[in-house]
C-alpha cells in the first residue's frame, strides 16, 4: 500500500490557512498606503519633515506598546477571534479617514487608529495559530504565515505603483481602494474562523512581571537595541529622500517594492546562516548593511543610485528581522522568555518616537543627509557595544553570577 503524498494543504491547519490569507490581504492594504503617507503629507498637505517624523513615531510606538498588553488581554479572556477581528476592523476604519484627510492632524489620527489595530491583533493572532497547530508543526506553520504576510507586503506597493502610473499623484484614490482588501480580511475572520471557546472555570489568570534572574548579557543587549533604534528612523524617511532626489511617486512605490522583495528573499537564508556561523556574526553583518545603506543615502542624491541603497536596506531587514528575535531566545531562560521578548519589543518601541522626531528635526534644520549620518553613527556605536558588552563581555566571570 502506498502512502498518500504530503502536500502543504494537508499539513497546514484550516484555521492557519484562513489566518494566512487574512494577513496577506491586510498587508496588501497596509502596504498600498504606508509608502504614500509621507508623500501625501509633504506634497498634498504641506507638512514639515518634523511633523511627518512625529506622526510616524506616535503611530509605531502605539503599536509596540499595545503588543505588550494585547497578549495579556487575550490570555485573560481567551477571546482570540474577537480581539483579532477587533484589531483588523480598527485598522480598516482608518483607511477612509486617511482618504478624506485635509490636515496633518487627521492623518495622525488615522495612522494612530491603524497602528492601534495592529498592536491589538498581533498577540491574539499568534495565539490562535498556536492553538490550531500541533506542537511538532509550529515552525512550518509560522513560516507559512510569515511568507503570506510578506507576499502581501510585496503585492501592496506593486498595486500602488500601477495605480499611480495611470493616475499620477492621486494618493486619495489609492487610499480608498486599500479599503477593499482590508474589508475582505475582516470578512474572512468573521466567516472563516470558528468562534472562541469559553475558558475553563478552573483556569486562573496570573500576571508575573519580574526582572530578577535576567542574564546581564541580555540587559546589555537591550542597551544595544536602544542605541541602534534611536538612530533607526522610519522607512518614511527613505521614501522622502527618494522624493527629494526627484523620483516620481510611482517609482517611489517601485523602490519600496524592491526593498520588500529583497527583504523577503533573505529571511530564510539569513536564519540558516545564523545557525551555521552564529547569530552574533549575522547581526553584525546586518547592522553593517544598515550603515552602508544609510551612509549611501546621506552621501548620494542621484535618483539612479537610490535603488542600490534601497536594496542594501532590504538586505539589512532580511538579515536581522528574524535573527534578532532568535538571539533574544538564547539570552533568556525558558521561564522568562515571554518577559524577555516583551522587554525587547518595549525598548525598540520606546525608541521609535524619539528616533523619528530627531530625524525630522535634523532634516528640517540641518539638511536631508543629517538623519542618515546620525543613524549610521549610532549603528556603529551599537556594533561596538554589541561586541564589547554582549558577544565578548570584558568581565565574563561576572556574568556567571
Image (cartoon, grey):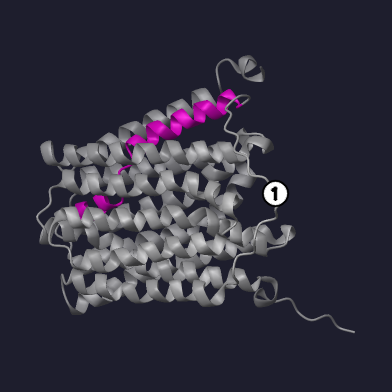
Q: Is residue 112 magenta?
A: no
| Quarter of the view holding residue 274 | top right
Q: Is residue 161 left or right of residue 27?
A: left
Up the image or down, 140 lies above or below 396; here it is below
Q: Is residue 175 visible?
A: yes
1 or 171, which is in the foreground? 171
Q: Which residues are magenta?
A: 214-242
Quarter of the image that includes the C terminus:
top right
Name the outermost residue toward the front: 201
Q: Residue at x 61, y 70 (%)?
A: 15
Q: Residue at x 42, y 46 (%)?
A: 64
Name the outermost residue toward the right: 1
184 or 235, which is in the foreground? 184
The residue indicated by pointer 1 is 203
Quarter of the image that includes the N terminus:
bottom right
- Percent coordinates x, y for residue 346 in the rendering: 45, 38
Q: Is residue 320 visible?
A: no
Name the outermost residue toward the left: 46
- Percent coordinates x, y for residue 190 in the rendering: 50, 74
Q: Is residue 66 left or right of residue 73?
A: left
- Percent coordinates x, y for residue 160 in the rendering: 28, 71
Dot 1 lies on which element? Answer: loop
259 or 65, which is in the foreground? 65
Up the image or down, 96 lies above or below 401; here it is below
Q: Residue at x 50, y 23 (%)?
A: 388
- Percent coordinates x, y for residue 240 in the rendering: 20, 53
Amino acid at each position: 500500500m502506498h502512502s498518500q503524498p504530503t502536500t502543504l494543504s494537508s499539513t497546514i491547519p484550516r484555521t492557519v490557512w484562513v489566518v494566512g490569507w487574512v494577513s496577506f490581504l491586510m498587508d496588501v492594504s497596509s502596504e498600498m498606503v504606508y509608502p504614500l503617507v509621507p508623500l501625501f503629507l509633504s506634497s498634498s498637505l504641506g507638512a514639515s519633515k518634523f511633523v511627518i517624523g512625529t506622526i510616524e513615531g506616535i503611530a509605531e510606538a502605539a503599536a509596540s506598546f499595545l503588543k505588550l498588553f494585547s497578549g495579556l488581554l487575550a490570555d485573560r479572556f481567551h477571546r482570540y477571534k474577537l480581539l483579532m477581528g477587533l484589531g483588523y476592523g480598527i485598522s480598516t476604519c482608518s483607511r477612509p479617514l486617511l482618504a478624506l484627510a485635509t490636515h496633518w492632524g487627521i492623518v495622525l489620527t488615522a495612522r494612530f487608529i491603524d497602528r492601534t489595530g495592529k498592536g491589538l491583533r498581533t498577540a491574539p493572532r499568534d495565539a490562535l495559530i498556536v492553538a490550531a497547530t500541533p506542537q511538532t508543526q509550529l515552525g512550518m506553520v509560522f513560516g507559512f504565515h510569515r511568507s503570506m504576510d510578506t507576499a502581501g507586503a510585496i503585492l501592496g506597493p506593486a498595486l500602488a505603483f500601477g495605480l499611480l502610473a495611470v493616475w499620477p499623484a492621486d494618493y486619495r484614490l489609492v487610499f480608498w481602494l486599500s479599503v477593499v482588501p482590508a474589508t475582505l480580511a475582516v470578512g474572512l475572520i468573521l466567516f472563516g474562523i470558528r468562534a472562541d471557546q469559553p475558558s475553563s472555570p478552573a483556569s486562573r489568570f496570573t500576571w508575573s512581571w519580574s526582572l530578577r534572574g535576567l542574564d546581564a548579557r541580555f540587559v546589555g543587549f537591550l542597551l544595544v537595541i536602544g542605541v541602534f533604534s534611536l538612530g533607526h528612523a522610519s522607512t518614511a524617511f527613505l521614501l522622502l529622500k527618494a522624493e527629494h532626489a526627484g523620483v516620481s511617486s510611482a517609482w517611489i512605490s517601485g523602490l519600496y517594492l524592491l526593498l520588500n522583495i529583497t527583504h523577503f528573499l533573505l529571511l530564510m537564508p539569513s536564519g540558516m546562516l545564523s545557525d551555521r556561523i552564529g547569530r552574533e556574526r549575522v547581526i553584525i553583518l546586518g547592522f553593517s548593511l544598515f550603515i552602508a545603506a544609510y551612509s549611501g543615502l546621506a552621501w548620494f542624491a542621484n535618483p539612479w543610485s537610490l535603488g542600490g541603497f534601497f536594496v542594501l536596506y532590504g538586505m539589512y531587514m532580511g538579515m536581522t528581522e528574524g535573527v534578532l528575535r532568535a538571539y533574544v531566545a538564547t539570552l533568556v531562560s525558558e521561564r522568562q522568555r515571554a518577559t524577555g521578548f516583551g522587554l525587547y519589543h518595549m525598548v525598540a518601541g520606546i525608541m521609535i518616537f524619539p528616533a523619528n522626531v530627531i530625524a525630522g528635526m535634523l532634516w528640517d534644520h540641518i539638511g536631508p543627509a543629517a538623519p542618515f549620518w546620525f543613524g549610521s553613527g549610532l549603528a556603529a556605536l551599537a556594533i561596538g557595544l554589541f561586541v564589547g558588552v554582549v558577544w565578548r563581555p570584558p568581565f565574563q566571570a561576572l556574568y556567571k553570577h
